[in-house]
Amino acid sequence: MKNIAFIGAGNMNSAIITGLVNTGYQAKNIIVTNPSPEKREKLAQQLGILETDNNIDAAEFADVIVLGIKPYLIAQVCQQIRQAMDISNKCFISVAAGCSIATIEKALNKPCAVIRTMPNTPSQIGLGVSGLYASANANQLQIDIAEQIMSAVGITKWLNSEEQIDHITAVSGSAPAYFFLFMEAMEKQAQVFGFSASDSRKLVQQTALGAAKMVCDSDLAISQLRENVTSKGGTTQAALTTFIDGGLQQLVTKAMNSALDRAKEMAQDNS
Ligand SMILES: NC(=O)C1=CN([C@@H]2O[C@H](COP(=O)(O)OP(=O)(O)OC[C@H]3O[C@@H](n4cnc5c(N)ncnc54)[C@H](OP(=O)(O)O)[C@@H]3O)[C@@H](O)[C@H]2O)C=CC1
Ligand SMILES: O=C(O)[C@@H]1CCC=N1
């Protein structure tokens, strides 16, 4: 079993580590680093993994290094690691949005096995989506372990080009927040209608869950499921017409393109 170092004990890495241990990966083969102690100590206590505040010690221990830190820190941490050791046989997996393989390779100062992944926060409950793209230097064993790590927290989609990492960021990486925003808006209006805060949340969350489950469990097109709710001349049609006349599709297109543009911009800023 390969040793894995998770650099950063934030939202994404914590979710991935938890999923990985829960699917049977040996805790003694996993180490997590974080500057502040609380998150890494909690993971160590809960899961039995190793922890340290020292990225170099963790990287020395590891065959695979998962970079779960903010995009602007990736190059700095990679430089720190490569200055301290021979990294030739190590595989770097970056979770960061807007930080290219070229930037990571430049920081590592040599062509290296680098795999980019773009998960999302439902990974915390095993319902994540992760896009993955491997550099030409990654071998099959390293690709397999990246698949094992990310499939521990949800479904995986291997991409044909690095550019698609930016696309999948807009489609699934950022997207839980789109649904949360929509649910927040509905929750607010339910309260205006007189439902209590807790009832409003319950009504909205159960409806979202039911709708998502119907999409997952049905062979019908999503548009058909929508039509099945929509009685001619009825209440749903009135609501949907308001969304459509308000330019919902154009707004979604614009929002997803904004996420895509921002990913490209961040890649420039971080290069
Ligand atoms: N959140 C999301 O929905 C998604 C995030 N991502 C990507 O995942 C990455 C991490 O995001 P997220 O988990 O949300 O962020 P968090 O802020 O939750 O986690 C980042 C962690 O990195 C730690 N850290 C800071 N500096 C260092 C360092 N030098 N060495 C080691 N650890 C360090 C921080 O510690 P401390 O708290 O002590 O400062 C923090 O715990 C980002 O690059 C983001 O683009 C990708 C997909 C989805
Ligand atoms: O907002 C961000 O930049 C990160 C990447 C996808 C989700 N969160």
Image (cartoon, grey):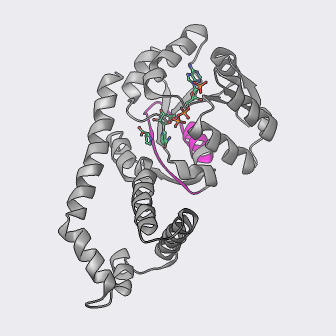
Asked whether residue 171 is in view, the answer is: yes
Q: Which residue is rendered at x = 29% and y = 76% of the image?
A: 239
Answer above or below: position of 177 versus 214.
Answer: above
Q: Quadrant of residue 240?
A: bottom left
The magenta span reads: 127-148
Asked whether residue 111 is in view, the answer is: no
In the rendered structure, does residue 17 fall within the stretch colored magenta? Answer: no
- Between residues 224 and 251, which one lies in front from this camera angle? 251
Quarter of the image with the N terminus is top right
Q: Position of residue 264 (x, y in %)?
A: 29, 34
Q: Which residue is rendered at x = 69% and y = 44% of the image?
A: 18
- Between residues 77 and 213, which one lies in front from this camera angle? 213
Q: Position of residue 197 (x, y in %)?
A: 54, 62
Q: Is residue 75 left or right of residue 29?
A: left
Q: Residue furthest top?
A: 83
Q: Which residue is rendered at x = 48% and y = 79% of the image?
A: 218
Quarter of the image with the C terminus is top left
Answer above or below: position of 208 versus 136.
Answer: below
- Between residues 145 and 242, which one lies in front from this camera angle? 242
Answer above or below: position of 115 versus 178.
Answer: above
- Between residues 9 and 235, which one lies in front from this camera angle? 235
Q: Give ligand 2's quarter of the image.
A: top left
Q: Quadrant of residue 265?
A: top left
Q: Position of residue 112 (x, y in %)?
A: 49, 24
